[in-house]
Amino acid sequence: MHAASEIHDFAISKQHGVKIVVVGSINMDLVYHVSRLPKPGETLTGTSFHQIHGGKGANQAVAAARMGADVSMIGRVGDDAFGASLIEGLQRESIDVSHVKISPATSSGLAVIGVDANGQNCIAVIPGANGQVIPTDIESAESIIAAANVLLVQLEIPVDAVITAINIARRHNVQIILDPAPAAESWSAELLNVNIVCPNETEASFFTGLPVGNIAEASAACLKLRSLGASIAIITMGGQGCVVCDESGVPVHVPAVPVTAVDTTAAGDAFAGALGFCLAQRRTIQEAVQFASAAGALAATRHGAQPAMPRFDEVTLQEYYGRGVPN
C-alpha cells in the first residue's frame, strides 16, 4: 500500500506542473553501431547508422518534458536543414523554443557517436552554432529563468554563457543543476557555485584531481566537489550506481537499477532531467536520485538520445518493480 500511495503522490504532483529552463546544446547526432569501438588508426565495418536529435541540453529538456514539466530551451541552432529539424523536434515535445536562436551562415551542432555491442560509446562533438551562444542570449531570457523552479546547465556551450545563466538563477533563487560535461579545460570556480553538480566518474576526476574508480574514491571526490562550491554533489557511476553527498557532508551510495544496457549515450541526460523534475516538486534529494537513477537506467536500454528519454509512467513503474519506491 505504501508503494502505491507513493506512486499516487508522484502522479498528483505531476499534474500541478513544474517549470524547468534548460540552457545548453542542441545537436544532431550521427550514430553508428559497431561490434566494438575502433582503435586509433583502425577501420571497422559498422552494422547500422542513424540520424537522431540530441545535444546534452536538448536531451535534458526532452527528458524533463516527458516527465510532465513545463520546459523552456535556451540555445542556438544553425541555419541549415539540421537546425530546422531540431527545432521541430523540440516543439513536438511541447518545449518552448522562443529563446532558441538561429545563427546565420553556421552549421548546427553535430555529434558523431560510436556505439559498441555492449552499449558503450565514444563521442566527437562539433559545436557549430552551440559555440556561438553568448551571455546576451541568456540575459535576454532572464524573465523565464526567474520564473523557473529549476535551471539545468551543461558544458557543451561556452563557459561564459553557462556562468551567466548560473548567476541569473542564483539572483532569483532558482535551483541550479550542473551536469559538467564535457569537462571544460577553461572552467572556473564560478561553475561549481550551484545547488547540485552531477558529473560521471571521468568528469568528477577531472574537476577534483582525484581518482574515481570505486565507491570509496567517489565518496572522497563528492566531498571535494562540495568543498569547491557545490551544495550537493552526485557522482554517477553506471553499473555501480551513484554516490550522493548532501549538506550533511556524509556520502551515501545509491545502487544502480539493474538493466541490460544497449546504449548509454543519453543515460546521464535522462538522469539530470528526471532529477530536476523531482527537485522542482520539492522531493528529497534521496527520492530524486532514486527516481533519476530509474530514468537513466531505462534510457540505457534504448538506442539513441532523445528517442531514449523515458516518460513519467515508465520511470515510476521501473522504480517500483526494479527496486521499490523509497520510504
Image (cartoon, grey):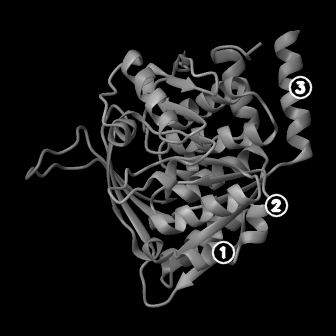
The crowd level at tag 2 (other Cα within 10 Å; few <14, some 14-19, many 20+) is some
Which dot marks residue 86? none
Q: Secondary structure at mark 1?
A: helix
Q: Amino acid at mark 1?
A: Glu
Q: Nearer the viewer, residue 88 or 162?
A: 162
Q: Position of residue 71 (x, y in %)?
A: 74, 58
The image quarter in which residue 118 lies: top left
Q: Amino acid at mark 2?
A: Ala
Q: Position of residue 53 (x, y in %)?
A: 52, 60
> Are circles 1 and 2 on residues that touch, CB within 8 Å?
no
- Mark with earlier residue (1, 2): 1
Q: Nearer the viewer, mark 1 or mark 3?
A: 1
Taking the image as drawn, is residue 301 in sight? Answer: no
Q: Nearer the viewer, residue 11 or 149?
A: 149
> Are circles 3 and 2 on residues that touch, CB within 8 Å?
no
Q: Amino acid at mark 3?
A: His
In the displayed orientation, state which residue is furthest to the top: 1
Left or right: residue 192 compared with residue 321? left
Q: Residue at x 27, y 44 (%)?
A: 34
> Are circles 1 and 3 on residues that touch, CB within 8 Å?
no
Pick the quarter of the image with the C terminus.
top right
Pointer 2 residue: 147
Q: Residue at x 60, y 47 (%)?
A: 194
Residue 212's place in the image compared with 58, above or below, is: above
Q: CA distance from mark 3 to mark 2?
A: 27 Å
Pointer 1 residue: 139
Q: Position of residue 297 (x, y in %)?
A: 54, 30
Q: Secondary structure at mark 3?
A: helix
Residue 242's place in the image compared with 323, above or below, is: below
Left or right: residue 294 compared with residue 192? right
Which dot marks residue 8? 3
Q: Secondary structure at mark 2?
A: loop
